[in-house]
Image (cartoon, rainbow, N blue to C red):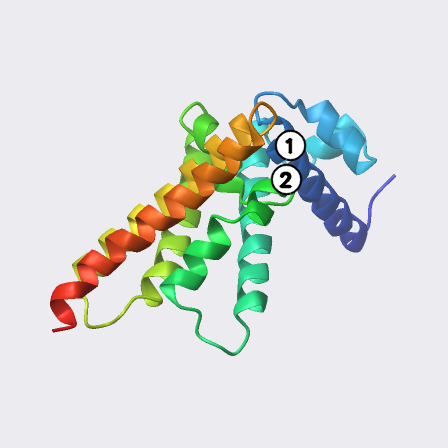
Amino acid sequence: MRVSKEKAAENREALLRAASKLFREKGIDGVGVADVAREAGLTHGALYAHFSSKDALAAAAFSEGFAGNMAAMRAWAGDRSPSYADYVDALMSERMRDRLATGCPMAASASEAGRQGEAFSESFTKAFEEEVAMVEASLDKAIPKTGRRQMAIAAVTAHIGALAVSRAVLKADPALSDEVLRSTRQAVLDAALKHDRPHSR
């Protein structure tokens, strides 16, 4: 039976939502295409009508999840211009840590990304650069551009690592999990203050 364009688009969206959720919860390598199809309420065959491989699905689902997170960040920012400290606090928060199924897909997938195909690597790279640009734009323009980019890259990398580690230890030691986030936030902010100091004289 032929599926209408509207229904096909709806099915594709359902598959992306299901894959994005499952990959973040259980890892890309821990989820099969049949699991994604079942979560979306569709058949295995329906999935391959939209995605040629699991790698293609993973790359598209990653981009879908990241786009949703960036939309949420823009809504959080609203009409104001969040400071560097605001972004650091938001990206390395307990709330971000606890949102496993809907949180940062980079933190959820970083340890697996190197084992995936080129399409996934491209999606991850694009997302990383977009988040770096967002954080970089919040830094004081008195800091040279190379310095701003360096600080933004360090902050986003710290965000990914801090979330991954804080999630890894959470069940065994919740206090340590909180300490990982708190210590990383403070270290990243302290580094920015040291960078600012020569320009504030």
Determine contact: label 2, label 1, CB under 8 Å. no
Q: Mark 2 points at which residue?
A: 20
Around disc 2, counting alpha carbons within 10 Å, would you say few (fewer than 14), some (14 to 19), or many (20 or more)? many
Q: Earlier in the sequence, mark 2 or mark 1?
A: 2
Query: Which image quarter: residue 135?
Result: bottom left
Tell me the element at label 1: helix
The residue that appears at 83% across and 35% down in the rendered structure is: 41
Q: In which quarter of the image is the C terminus?
A: bottom left
Does the rendering let one see residue 118? yes
Q: Above or below — where is 30 with respect to 179? A: above
Residue 14 in the image, given as x and y percentages of width and height: 74, 44
Q: Position of residue 176 (x, y in %)?
A: 49, 32
Numbered label attached to residue 25: 1
Rendered location of residue 197, percent (x, y): 16, 64
Farthest bottom residue? 79
Residue 56: quadrant of the picture: top right
Residue displayed at 44% across by 69% down: 82
| Mark 2 or mark 1, whichever is nearer to me | 1
CA gap, disc 2 and disc 1: 9 Å
Compared with 41, 150 (above or below) is below
Q: Is residue 174 left or right of residue 181?
A: right
Depth check, front residue: 68 or 95 = 95
Residue beneath the point at 44% across and 63% down: 86
